[in-house]
Amino acid sequence: MIFRLLFVLCLVLSIFWLVRRNYLSLDFAWLLFLMLAAVFGVSLSPWAVENLATVFDFGMPAMAIVALSIAALVGICLVLAVELTALKKQNALLLRKLANLELSAGQFRDSVDDQLPTKE
Amino acid sequence: MILFFIPSFNDYELISDLVETLLTSHTQARVLVVDDGSSVPISFSLDPSLRDRAALYRLETNSGLGVATSIAIDHFLQSSFKVLVRVDADGQHPVSEISKLCQPVLQELTDIVWAERLSDEKGFAGSFGRWRERTKGLTCWLAQTAMGCSHTDWFSGFFAMSRRAAEGFQADYLERYCEVQMLCLAYARRMRIETVMVHQIDRVHGESTIKLFGGFMVVLRAWLLILVHASARERL
């Protein structure tokens, strides 16, 4: 139990740090929190783990292997979320640069003129 | 001297009147409307004498308020304006109260002036009624407890900022609904923040972009941001 709690605590603190440093967006952070809560909840019940293993036809693996697999999956999700956040940031940066260029070059003025009919 | 920034997503009924009112009541101001990927591109008509003081920039896809705000901040810093004021396109922010926001920034008394919304008849205005009030109250309590700041309207998008404050936000990646994020960053960076009470006008046209699930996510994001900044021990 202590190791489970330590694992969850470490992940929560990592997520906080990643959000604070802008490496992880808030939506992904909440999804990871939900995932952590679900994994922690399931891990409290060996019956639920056994049933899940049966449903997915995993046979009856040792609990240590299940725990390691879940930890690995959560870790992979965290890395993917960080990568996706980086992509979102890159996209936002490109949009900003494009807007900045268009606004500074005065190109927007033509499009505004096209779109802003003079009041009669 | 003043750059008005109006983010808009499918809110076009009042844009013409709003831009015209802003420009006629502030003779040294310019307006930047950012159309955040509205399904029908936003357009508006203006008096010929005002046309060179208004700009419209359209994002092809809905990228969120954070990107629109960052575009306005970049444009603000590239120009020689002294104050950046955000005004919502739905007409809920009273133009008559803008001077209350701008004056302290123009006099360099503060970096950011944040409006706290009041309505005489209905208390704090809002479409989700009591639940919205309770959520706001809980957010205030969390912010007070975790960060030690007594700000009472974390979700207001009516604010004015100085060039110093804008420089502080320029390098940040602002999220989709960025008001709480901006306030948290401003508190964490010890910017000078002043709050003023404004009487919010009830919405007449269109509908809020924040629905029930969206509102829930906005609140969750706000709480996470407050906890993150509190956990970094940047208490005030």
Image (cartoon, grey):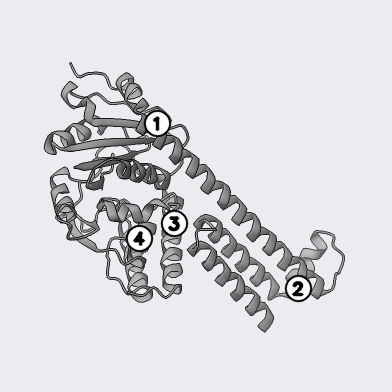
Q: Which residue is mark 4?
A: B131
Disc 3 residue crowd, few under 14, some 14–19, many 20+, Cα 10 Å: few
Q: Which residue is mark 3?
A: B216
Mark 1 residue element: helix
> Looking at numbered disc 1 in the image, what kind of residue is underneath it?
Glu
Q: What's the chain of the residue with tag 4?
A: B
Of callouts 1 and 2, which one flags the residue occurring earlier in the amino acid sequence?
Answer: 2
Do tag 4 and tag 2 residues touch (Cβ < 8 Å)? Answer: no
Mark 4 residue element: helix
The answer to whether residue B209 is seen in the rendering is no
- Farthest residue in the bottom direction? A2
Q: Which residue is located at x 44 percent, y 56 percent?
A: B216
Disc 1 residue crowd, few under 14, some 14–19, many 20+, Cα 10 Å: some
The residue lying toward the viewer, choosing from A76 and A90, is: A90
In the picture, measured across the screen, residue A56 lies left or right of residue B164, that is right
- Cα separation between marks 1 and 2: 60 Å
In the picture, measured across the screen, residue B60 lies left or right of residue B96, that is right
Q: What x and y, as percent, mark residue B212?
A: 42, 51
> Looking at numbered disc 2 in the image, what kind of residue is underneath it?
Trp
Mark 2 residue element: helix
Of callouts 3 and 4, which one flags the residue occurring earlier in the amino acid sequence?
Answer: 4
Q: Which residue is mark 1?
A: A102
Q: Quadrant of the N terminus of chain B?
A: top left
Q: What's the chain of the residue with tag 2?
A: A
- Farthest residue in the top direction? A120
Front: mark 3 or 4: 3
Res. A17 mark: none
